[in-house]
Amino acid sequence: DAQLLVTALRRLQIQLPDKRILLDANATRAAFDWAWQDMLNQAQPGDTLILTFSGHGGQVPDIPPLGEIDQSDEMLMFHDFNPIHPLQGSIIDDDMYNLLEKASINYNIVLVVDACHSSGATRSQARQSGKIRNGGRYKVQSDLSMPSQREDTELPRNVTRISGVVSDSLK
């Protein structure tokens, strides 16, 4: 799917440098962080940034508890995801929200998430069925303190999310 997105975006003549196309073993959390910063460094205020993710997702307990309906943070898993230390090689919904919120002050952002079992990378969404399939629920160390203290459920302004999820995953 990632390669199909690259082809489609380039057909639309969207600037997409090879160095920011992260596939397979190159799709690590560190590479994502670098590519995101590189894109911000190249962008001009008012530009539209496009962030796509094709991969897998899962959940970790909501730490610190921010009132998630399912008491879980959804996450996107990169190639270097480590199930023993699940916050390595992943990005949780709160952290993704913080990246988008900060960037949305100057840019319009289109986020395309094609990640099985990530619940659309959405926090605090009620599930119609009360259950959701996922790529696993992982335990994290209880002494972790996440930087986010948000409680909102809406995406930041100037952010559009397009996601592919199982029809019963989100209302």
Image (cartoon, grey):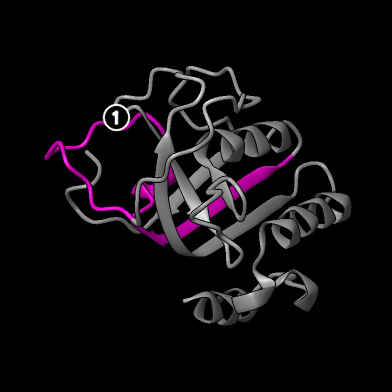
Image x and y of residue 44, in percent: 85, 48
**Relative depth, front residue between 124 and 72:** 72
- Give the magenta-colored segment's residue range: 107-134
Which element is circle 1 on?
Answer: loop
Relative to residue 68, is residue 149 drawn left or right? right
**Relative depth, front residue between 110 and 99:** 99
Residue 116 inside the magenta-drawn segment:
yes
Q: In which quarter of the image is residue 148?
A: top right
Considering only vertical position in the picture, is 52 above or below 104?
below
Image x and y of residue 56, in percent: 43, 62
Q: Which residue lies furthest to the left in this view?
A: 129
Relative to residue 157, is residue 30 drawn left or right? right
Image x and y of residue 125, in percent: 31, 32
Q: Quadrant of residue 144?
A: top right
Examine the rendering and report whether any part of residue 122 can be seen. no
Residue at 61% x, 64% y: name it. Answer: 80
**Relative depth, front residue between 4 and 58:** 58
Q: Quadrant of residue 51?
A: bottom right
Residue at 50% x, 57% y: name it. Answer: 112
Q: What residue type is labelled 1?
A: Asp
Image x and y of residue 77, in percent: 51, 57
Q: Name the residue under label 1.
A: 70
Residue 9 inside the magenta-drawn segment:
no
Image quadrant holding the C terminus, namely top left
Q: How many dots with numbers?
A: 1
Residue at 58% x, 30% y: name it. Answer: 157
Examine the rendering and report whether any part of residue 109 can be seen. yes
Residue at 68% x, 53% y: name it. Answer: 49
Considering only vertical position in the picture, is 144 above or below 85?
above
Relative to residue 150, is residue 103 drawn left or right? right
Few, some or many residues within 10 Å of mark 1 (<14, 14–19, 20+): some
